[in-house]
């Protein structure tokens, strides 16, 4: 999402590196899985059905639905260029409102907020806040886990 600053502190797990940007992506952007017309990569259960570059991600726009977040871009990439995406790790992010240390967090158009499990189905957990924030646009440490 534009304006989001994510700094990796400690990587855990592995980054998905065989994904392709569908447009301009900047390191630190939240990205989501981009559905294509060739979704069924393993239809015939053949090992060669998957090729590097068959998985696409797109930058999460400000105010966009956050239900499809798959991680954080680790490098800049233009359209159709390969981008590495972190799915786990410890990051510094920007707060939206006042996230609470220890609570599950979700992305919003303005940053990270406490997960909102309401009847509307709004929100998608992207990790857990390790520190809180006293107001919007403050830095917080969070554990990414998608």
Image (spheres, rainbow, N blue to C red):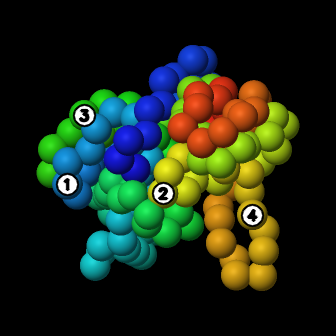
Q: Which circle marks residue 116 in the picture?
A: 4
Q: Secondary structure at mark 3?
A: loop
Question: Residue 109, labelled with which disc?
Answer: 2
Pointer 3 with pointer 1, Cβ within 8 A? no
| Earlier sequence position, callout 3 versus callout 4 | 3
Q: Residue 53 vs residue 141: left or right? A: left
- Mark 3 or mark 1, which has the lower sequence index? 1
First-in-chain label (2 vs 3) = 3
Callout in the foreground (3, 4): 4
Residue 63 visible in rendering: yes
Q: Secondary structure at mark 4?
A: loop
The answer to whether residue 52 shows anywhere in this view is: no
Above or below, 101 relative to 19: above
**Nearer mark to the viewer, of 4 and 1:** 4
Q: Which residue occupies 43% across, 40% down?
A: 4
Q: Secondary structure at mark 1?
A: loop
Q: Earlier in the sequence, mark 4 or mark 2?
A: 2
Picture coordinates of residue 143, whole percent (x, y): 68, 33
């Amino acid at each position: 999402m534009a304006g989001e600053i994510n700094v990796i502190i400690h990587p855990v797990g592995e980054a998905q590196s065989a994904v392709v940007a569908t447009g301009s992506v900047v390191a630190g952007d939240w990205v989501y899985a981009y559905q294509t017309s060739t979704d069924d990569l393993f239809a015939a259960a053949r090992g060669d059905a998957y090729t590097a570059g068959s998985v696409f991600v797109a930058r999460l726009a400000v105010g966009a639905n956050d239900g499809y977040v798959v991680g954080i871009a680790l490098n800049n990439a233009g359209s159709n260029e390969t981008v590495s995406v972190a799915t786990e790790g410890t990051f510094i992010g920007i707060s939206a409102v006042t996230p609470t240390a220890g609570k599950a967090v979700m992305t919003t158009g303005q940053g990270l907020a406490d997960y909102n499990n309401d009847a509307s189905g709004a929100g998608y957990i992207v990790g857990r806040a390790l520190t809180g924030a006293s107001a919007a646009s403050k830095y917080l440490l969070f554990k990414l886990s998608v």
